[in-house]
Image (cartoon, grey):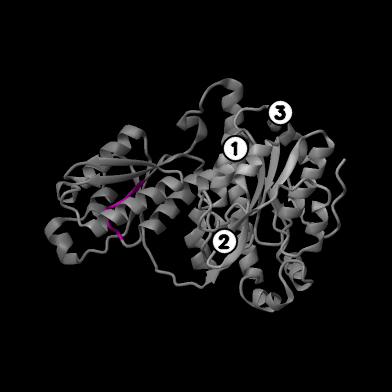
Amino acid sequence: MSAPDPPDVPVERRRSSRPTSDFLALVKRQERGKLKLYIGSAAGTGKSYRMLNEAHDLRDRGVDIVVGFIETHGRAETAAQVRDLEIVPRQKVEYRGVTLEEMDVDAVIARRPQVAVVDELAHSNVPGTRHRKRWEDVMELLDQGINVISAVNVQHLESLNDVVASTLGVSVRETVPDWVVASADQVIYLDISAEDLRQRLREGRIYTSDKIEPALRNFFTDENLTTLRELALREVAGAVDRSREEIVRRVTGEVPTVAQRTVERVLVAMSSNPPYTAALLRKASRIAGRLNTDWYCVYVQTAAERADRIDSTVQRTLVANIQLAQTMGAEVVKLEGEDVADTLCRFAAKKGVTLLLVGQSKRSRLYHMMKGSIVERLVNNDQGLDVLVVSFDPVKAPIAGGQS
């Protein structure tokens, strides 16, 4: 049996009092590796501790488990949990005259454990390693049939980047695509109150002493932590809905119809070079996540925007936005047509889309008088398609560190 939690370890919100058992069943069902993900509202909620605690429990029950990467951040209780677990030696990488350490993906694959513990899913790897992000390392381990237990803070989800920046005043540089979280076989939320988390910070159990007061004044405020807690709860609620749907599909062999799921299908209309496309895509991703539905990102190419006519800078921006939409789980579709509004409406009708998102037009009133307004035509469509016109308020925010 696993050791009981110390009194200060946050409460884990779950149905089962023994979370390892369900994951153990997944481990034994060996195909592609299974991913178990711990989500916290902020650093210090106990994700690393819980992963290591579970690692001991799994090992005691005969599972071959290793630590692929763990970062204790100097926390004594987390370091103590490493104890006698097998740790795969890290890869040493020279970068700008400094030797840094990353997870050695090849060494983990060569060791071929049943389960690997890999901390800080949103981490950016040192240039020179095979993958740019640690979540890509994890995807490779899963492809190799190695099960992974990992962790992430809710502010690192790509679709929440703008929300965190606007509500908390913090710009998070390290992000994880939403589809990675959505693909997890198990998601566990570690819950802790804002005051308890601030107390852990004061006691030096999250950051070193020189960072405590600045953190209390800036990121670790009651308001910020409460907001992050709400965002984490919403994400986990979406994961539960996805899990329930997968169980129904597995048991019945049927995919629930739109009517059965009472879920709307979402489409976001993307123009070739809008100033706030990233914010529009993140909003669409969040809405689709809450509705637990797939979503489309549709770009209608007119004759004036053919590859041989479009400006190279605009083309690069368009490609970057398409890639961003794909990382957030959208099905990207390129259509051709001179009547953009009509093309979008016909596609929506064909796919059963009931909600369309479009960015607020920045063109002048004179332009709309002469050329007409695509947004206005979409809003006044006659096929019962709901249209959400998204306005944008640019946010300038300080950069937050990547520690999870």
> Could you say where residue 235 lies in the image, as x and y percent from the top left?
58, 49
Q: Where's residue 204, x and y in %?
A: 77, 71
Kind of residue at disc 1: Leu
User: What label does residue 142 carry, if any?
Assistant: 1
- Dot 3 amino acid type: Lys
In the image, is residue 167 part of the stretch drawn in magenta?
Answer: no
**Which residue occupies 61% across, 61% down?**
100
Q: Nearer the viewer, residue 403 or 203?
A: 403
Choose mark 3 or mark 1, whichever is in front.
1
- Disc 3: which residue: 28
Q: Are marks 2 and 3 in contact (CB under 8 Å)?
A: no
Q: Which residue is mark 2?
A: 94
Badge 2 amino acid: Glu
119 versus 108 height, above or below: below
Residue 4 located left or right of residue 209: right
Question: Does label 3 or label 1 sit earlier along the sequence?
Answer: 3
Circle nearer the N terminus (2, 3):
3
x 50%, y 54%: residue: 158
Residue ID at (63%, 58%): 101
Residue 168: x and y in percent read 55, 68
